[in-house]
Image (cartoon, rainbow, N blue to C red):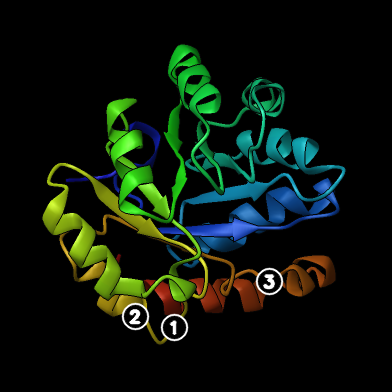
Amino acid sequence: MTNPGALAGHRIVPVVVIDDPARAVGLADALAAGGIHCAEITLRTPRALEAIAAMSAAADFTVGVGTVLTTTQLAAAVDAGARFVVSPGLDEQVVRASHDLGVDVLPGIATASEAMAAMRLGVEVVKFFPADRLGGLATIRAMAAALPGLDFVPSGGVGESTIAEYLADPAVPAVSGAWMCPASLIAAGDFDRITELAARAVTLGGDA
């Protein structure tokens, strides 16, 4: 299975924590220069919605919103330009509201029961979080074998040492993580370094 709608073709989804929306366009350009054309802006900072709005105006770049906990946050992010929604857990209201708004949603799951609940809500791709604490690829493979039709995007502890193995598995359409664009580099405006890290991630991921 491939990623749904807005994430189709995107194999690496950077998780971005950004304080200054003025850095958003530069960040999008830096990631794109390294071969990554999407990002998940987390709602962990007061000006995240402004960053989503700024980045969504960038050409050939897909912007999503992460750390979505409520339907109010969801609506505000979609209004700002978010094209996909990521949540740390499975919230039925957030999933249904995403469907109603016509945006793709990747709810977080940690157990087979949560995965089954997501499938009942019409979800085909879930966020497996926190992946490194839940057994990583071995757990994904075990759940995927029992739940055909569901794919998993691991997040949490994913990095250069694990990206290739994850992306080689047919049940993993993409990985997500912050290692190629840490908040410290964004704050410093070190976009050249972010481009280098993005390009390395793409190479390690098998030209993802």
Task: Inspect the image, locate mark 3, and give the three-letter code of the amino acid beneath it.
Answer: Pro
Q: Badge 1, how many Cα within 10 Å: few under 14, some, many 20+?
A: some
**SS at mark 1 in the image:** loop
Would residue 176 appear left or right of 54 to someone viewing this image? Answer: left
Counting residues from the N terminus, which is met first, the one under dot 3 or under dot 1? 1
In the rendering, which numbered label is found on residue 204? 2
In contact (CB < 8 Å): disc 1 and disc 2: yes
CA gap, disc 1 to disc 2? 7 Å
In percent of width and height, residue 122 lies at 29, 26
Q: Residue at x 79, y 36 (%)?
A: 50
Query: According to the image, label 3 marks what residue?
Result: 182
Is residue 76 something one can see in this rendering? yes
In percent of width and height, residue 159 lies at 47, 78
**SS at mark 3 in the image:** loop
Counting residues from the N terminus, which is met first, the one under dot 1 or under dot 2? 1
In the rendering, which numbered label is found on residue 114? none
**Quarter of the image that includes the C terminus:** bottom left
| Image position of 192 with respect to 173: above or below | below
In contact (CB < 8 Å): disc 3 and disc 2: no
In percent of width and height, residue 53 lies at 71, 33
Q: Residue at x 63, y 69 (%)?
A: 181
Task: Inspect the image, locate mark 2, and give the three-letter code of the amino acid beneath it.
Answer: Leu
CA gap, disc 3 to disc 2? 18 Å
Towards the viewer: 149 or 203: 149
Would residue 19 appear left or right of 84 to someone viewing this image? Answer: right
**SS at mark 2 in the image:** helix
Counting residues from the N terminus, which is met first, the one under dot 3 or under dot 2? 3
Task: Inspect the image, locate mark 1, and give the three-letter code of the amino acid beneath it.
Answer: Glu
Q: Badge 3, how many Cα within 10 Å: few under 14, some, many 20+?
A: some
In contact (CB < 8 Å): disc 3 and disc 1: no
Query: According to the image, label 1 marks what residue?
Result: 160
